[in-house]
Amino acid sequence: MKLYSYFRSSASFRVRIALNLKGLAYEYMPVHLTKGEQKKPEFAALTVEQLVPLLETDQGQRLTQSMAIIEYLDETHPEPPLLPADSLGRARVRALSQVVACEIHPLNNLRVLKYLVRDLQVSDDAKNGWYKHWVHVGLEAFEGHLAAAPNSTYCHGEAPTMADCCLVPQIFNAQRFDCDLSGLPRTMAVFEACMKLEAFQKAQPSACPDAEA
């Protein structure tokens, strides 16, 4: 398999974690987003979204959107599972995943931040305030979901799920933007538990072939 990725892309980070948890080998194909490589004809010809991650399977199919890719990997390589066996559990894990992937990340991804500064003439301070606001709102909701359920090592139970694949990259980004992560005891405990696992360590931005300081 080939994974088109950018080391700072949190959506790509999610897929890297999932691949590692599944023990699946892949070829890392760097696409430098801040240099606009996603818009070059050779990459644009592969995906209409012109975004990463893009997973190319061994059979040559190309899959986009991190959540869809993770569920594909879970269906085609079911061990270890990234979604619970029961329907309520699956709904909870998907909801936790979407708090990050649908409520936080879309408001704060690179192209939105660039649009705020370039097109709307927002100052860097205002842009950073925007980022921190939506991280705070989203992670408070995430914490509330965790607090409403029995304590567990990971987001849902005693093994990582798709929700953990989504949470960890968001915490990395929040730390990079110096967001206040106090008042999130359950969330940060899950993050710390995840980062003790090799699958998460190997997927982090600093471990990527295209990593920059």
Image (tube, rainbow, N blue to C red):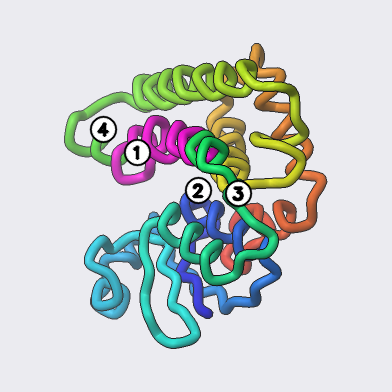
Query: Upstream in the sequence, badge 4 or badge 1?
Result: 1
Q: Where on the picture, by quarter, is residue 188?
A: top right
In front: label 3 or label 2 = 3
Point out the residue furthest to the bottom here: 59
Q: Residue at x 41, y 23 (%)?
A: 134
Point out the residue furthest to the top here: 183
Query: Upstream in the sequence, badge 1 or badge 2?
Result: 2
Question: Does 68 sit left or right of 141 as displayed?
Answer: left
Mark 4 is surrounded, within 10 Å at the Cα level, by few (under 14), some (14 to 19) or many (20 or more) other residues, namely some
Q: Are marks 3 and 1 in contact (CB under 8 Å)?
A: no
Residue position for label 4? 116
Q: CA distance from mark 3 to mark 2?
A: 26 Å
Query: Upstream in the sequence, badge 3 or badge 1?
Result: 3
Closest to the observer, 188 or 95: 95
Identify the magenta region. 93-112
Q: Are marks 1 and 2 in contact (CB under 8 Å)?
A: no
Q: CA distance from mark 4 to mark 3?
A: 42 Å
Where's residue 185, x and y in %?
71, 18
Question: Does 144 sit left or right of 125 as displayed?
Answer: right
Q: CA distance from mark 4 to mark 2?
A: 19 Å
Residue position for label 2? 10
Q: Amino acid at mark 4?
A: Leu
Q: Where on the picture, by quarter, is residue 125?
A: top left
Q: Residue at x 60, y 58 (%)?
A: 18
**Secondary structure category for the residue under label 1:** helix
Q: Amino acid at mark 1?
A: Pro
Where's residue 2, x and y in %?
50, 78
Residue 183, relative to residue 173: is it above or below?
above
Q: CA distance from mark 3 to mark 1?
A: 29 Å
In front: label 4 or label 1 = 1
Residue position for label 1? 106
Residue position for label 3? 85
